[in-house]
């Protein structure tokens, strides 16, 4: 026994440790289907989980009492869902619902420290006019979703019109103010907030060509917004977070407004709402740079796997099951799977594993025969593993997730 312990100890001492990141699961937000004339829910909002290792998709949550969904984000061991007039907090491992809160008009979610910042906007189902709220930007606790703070819509105190996208950096919150529920009166403003003091610092006007910002991205010290104007074209705005200077670039290939978009390899991918072609804008050269090869569907949303760089893209007809296409770094088709109705958000549950590996000097391996544990049992699990090769070489590693 003592000799075995000494051997085991010598193995562990000789290990070098490294952190490997992997995708535990992919979460998908599915909007479902609604009859707008009767407000009848045809297919409910659903959350799905996809396992890239087994290529299996499972519906994990059905939210039957909401008409639509607008956002899904992961934070540590939990994920948060904005759906209709509610926010839900779920356990990321068990999928149990922890708590929910009523928030009329909730749109997008953003977490900063222990705060959940939310944007707001809605239209009246009877008059189809924009709903007026006392606040279009609010703050809740990520612990129990209790209300913390409201940015009043009075001039200078907070956004005066409905808000949409919201992102953060290490010091600031940035919110896109588009007044998106009042046709013909869209705005193009980026509001800047100090999330530590809740000060509404400044508003940046994007100008006439930058109205109706829909999607917002952060890349380095730049904030980009994709603007749909009056749905008669689109533009890209760039805000330098250092000096707050802005530039706006027209997207000549878009005639009716943009749909899915994403930043990938210093390129903004975007496409017209009614087209199958995907175009790219070079954010390093600040110019349009033609078509993206191999992406030839009309996509509802796009998302990048942060570990291997694969692109996940949603194709939907808004009434039947949704197809998710997966492309590699060169946009070559890799795989696909079927999700629920109208997948509008795809996010990745990324985790880390600690791997300890002993590197032997005479590591001249041929073919792996098998991997075993200390008792000689075949294994590929956590713990101490011995890899035996046909030339007699044995490598040792200890895996902890």
Image: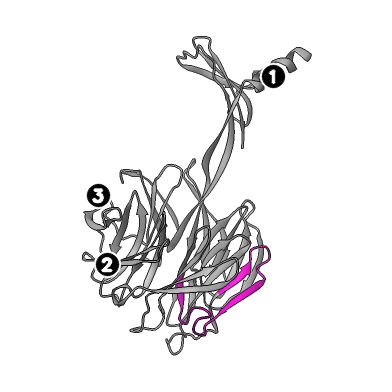
Does residue 232 appear to the left or right of 322 in the view shown? Answer: left
Seen in the picture, residue 331 relative to 143 is either above or below; the reply is above
Q: Which residues are magenta?
A: 138-164
**Distance Cα–Cα, label 2 vs label 1:** 63 Å
The residue under label 3 is 293
Q: At 47% from the left edge and 82% from the top edge, which residue is drawn?
A: 160
**Distance Cα–Cα, label 3 vs label 2:** 18 Å
The residue under label 1 is 8
The outermost residue toward the top is: 391
Q: Position of residue 249 (x, y in %)?
A: 27, 66
C-beta proximity under 8 Å, tags 3 and 1: no
Q: Nearer the viewer, mark 3 or mark 2?
A: 3
Does residue 293 show up?
yes
Q: Nearer the viewer, residue 386 or 94?
A: 386
Estimate how packed mark 3 is, as few (under 14), some (14 to 19) or many (20 or more) residues with alpha carbons within 10 Å: few
Q: Position of residue 175 (x, y in %)?
A: 46, 70
Which element is circle 3 on? loop
The residue under label 2 is 274
Does residue 52 appear to the left or right of 79 in the view shown? Answer: left
Does residue 168 appear to the left or right of 114 in the view shown? Answer: left
């Amino acid at each position: 026994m003592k000799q075995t312990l000494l051997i085991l100890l010598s193995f562990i001492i000789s290990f070098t440790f490294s952190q490997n990141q992997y995708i535990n699961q992919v979460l998908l937000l599915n909007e479902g289907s609604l009859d707008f004339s009767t407000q009848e829910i045809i297919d409910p909002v659903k959350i799905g989980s996809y396992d890239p290792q087994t290529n299996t998709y499972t519906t994990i949550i059905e939210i039957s009492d909401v008409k639509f969904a607008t956002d899904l984000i992961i934070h540590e061991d939990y994920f948060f869902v904005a759906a209709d007039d509610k926010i839900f907090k779920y356990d990321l491992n068990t999928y149990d619902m922890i708590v929910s809160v009523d928030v009329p008009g909730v749109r997008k979610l953003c977490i900063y420290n222990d705060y959940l910042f939310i944007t707001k906007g809605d239209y009246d189902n009877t008059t189809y006019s924009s709903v007026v709220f006392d606040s279009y930007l609010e703050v809740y606790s990520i612990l129990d979703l209790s209300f913390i703070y409201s940015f009043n819509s009075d001039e200078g105190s907070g956004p005066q019109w409905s808000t949409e996208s919201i992102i953060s950096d290490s010091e600031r919150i940035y919110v896109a103010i588009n007044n998106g529920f009042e046709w013909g009166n869209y705005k193009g403003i980026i509001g800047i907030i100090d999330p530590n003091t809740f000060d509404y610092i400044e508003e940046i006007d994007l100008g006439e060509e930058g109205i109706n910002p829909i999607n917002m991205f952060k890349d380095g010290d730049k904030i980009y917004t994709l603007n749909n104007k009056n749905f008669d074209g689109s533009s890209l705005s760039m805000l330098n977070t250092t000096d707050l200077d802005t530039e706006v670039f027209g997207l000549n290939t878009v005639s009716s407004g943009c749909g899915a978009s994403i930043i990938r390899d210093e390129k903004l991918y975007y496409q017209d709402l009614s087209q199958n072609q995907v175009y790219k804008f070079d954010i390093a050269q600040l110019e349009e740079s033609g078509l993206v090869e191999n992406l030839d569907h009309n996509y509802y949303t796009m998302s990048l796997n942060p570990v291997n760089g694969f692109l996940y893209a949603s194709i939907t007809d808004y009434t039947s099951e949704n197809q998710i296409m997966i492309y590699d770094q060169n946009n070559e088709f890799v795989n696909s799977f079927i999700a629920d109705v109208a997948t509008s958000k795809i996010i990745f549950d990324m985790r880390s594993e600690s791997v300890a590996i002993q590197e032997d000097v005479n590591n001249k391996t041929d073919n792996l025969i098998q991997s075993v544990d200390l008792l000689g049992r075949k294994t590929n699990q956590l713990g101490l593993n011995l890899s035996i090769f046909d030339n007699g070489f044995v490598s040792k590693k200890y895996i902890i997730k």
